[in-house]
Amino acid sequence: PGLLINATWLSTADYVAYKLTGNMATDYSLAGRTYAFRIDQKIWDEEWLQALGIQADLFPPAVPSGQPVGEIISEAASLTNLVQGTPVAICGHDHVCAAFAGVGIDTGKVFDSMGTAEALLGSLDKGALGEIEYQSGLVFGCHVAGGGYYWMGGMSASGGSLEWLRRLLGQPPITYQDIDDILEGAKPEPTGILYFPYLSGSGSPHTDTLARGAFVGLSKDHSRSDLVKAVLEGTAYEAEFIRQAAENILGTTIDSITASGGGTRNPYWMQIKADISGCTIEAPAIHEATLLGAALVAGIGIGLFADPREAISTVQKNPGYSYKPNFSQHKTYQRIYQEGFVPLQAPLRRTSQNLSRSNSL
């Protein structure tokens, strides 16, 4: 408890801004990640904090994403070669910044941020969040643009699962080209193997830190290419779980997804995602969506752009690639998903919890 005396809580981004400007602050989207911030009122939840014995002044002032919190001071300028007096803004949650660059704040559009971790997210313009949103298991917070909310579901080991497999299949780890070559030899139909990508627990909408990964359905006839493809299928099944949870809160069908990040460079993975979801997957050539989104948010904050729509209109997107679902494959994948991936969730989680308790004895 003594650590909190005369202290101020800052996220990593807030700390960088503090070292550049000498001012302590955070933005709404990062403040919401603390569970100490009222995202509906944009204030620190003093009543909730007092119940926990925490003073609200532990936290810095919270401001809209992109609003300047100060200017670069001379000491920071000399250390970084940045120009003294340059405005500094905290632009918010990385996945949300990427989504803003990819799909703006249109509530009808969904963004898939693919990296070591993966998040499926979109905008929500509801005035208040209620029981439907709570029961969905998804994460909600303040969007970095437009003043509304975002919804998000995620998995911590999406690209991370592929990295893990690369290390297992070779020392040193096999290359991404090796992965492509292996997938080139894979059978076109679904593997029938269920991979659960919970190498470090599962994220929303079924958050469970004790969940552990698994392969189910292996046989002596399966090959290395089947294992690699199964990992891609498993992460896509998990993304499908998120997509269906989002459809419930949006009250509409999601039939198109815009994707960005390192995972989009693997065309086999993208086609599998399209086949499992039945959605068209658009992968525009935005190589650094998070940085682009942050720059646009900062541009709004300093008045360079009048509003989010003007900011987005300035982005020239290379169309990149589009992946259409093979509906014959989709039918088979959905049967495997509905009859295998979903029903095995509960027993797999119970087993993980039991093993965790046994290991702690």
Image: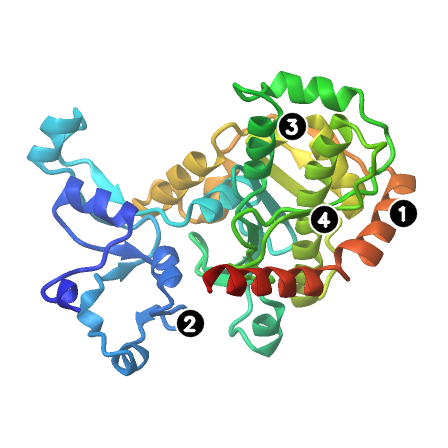
Instruction: Classify mark 4: helix, strand or loop.
Output: helix
Q: Amino acid at mark 4?
A: Tyr
Name the disc covering residue 331, or none.
Answer: 1
Q: Are discs 1 and 4 less than 8 Å apart at CB?
A: no
Please identify, in this view, whether the residue under mark 3 or under mark 1 is nearer the observer: 1
Which residue is more in the foreground, 113 or 41? 113
Label whose residue precedes the other's in the sequence (3 or 4): 4
Label whose residue precedes the other's in the sequence (3 or 2): 2
Kindly report the distance in space between the C-alpha atoms of the residues bearing marks 3 and 4: 26 Å
Kindly report the distance in space between the C-alpha atoms of the residues bearing marks 3 and 2: 36 Å
Instruction: Classify mark 1: helix, strand or loop.
Output: helix
Q: Are discs 3 and 4 less than 8 Å apart at CB?
A: no
Q: Quadrant of the N terminus?
A: bottom left
Q: Are discs 3 and 1 less than 8 Å apart at CB?
A: no
* Residue named by callout 2: 40
10 Å neighbourhood of mark 1: few (<14), some, or many (≥20)?
some
- Name above or below for residue 358 compared with residue 73: below
Label whose residue precedes the other's in the sequence (4 or 2): 2
Please identify, in this view, whether the residue under mark 4 or under mark 2 is nearer the observer: 4
Q: Amino acid at mark 1?
A: Lys
Q: Give me the residue at 64% from left, 32% from top.
A: 283
- The spot of residue 60 in percent (x, y) is 21, 61
Kindly report the distance in space between the C-alpha atoms of the residues bearing marks 1 and 2: 41 Å
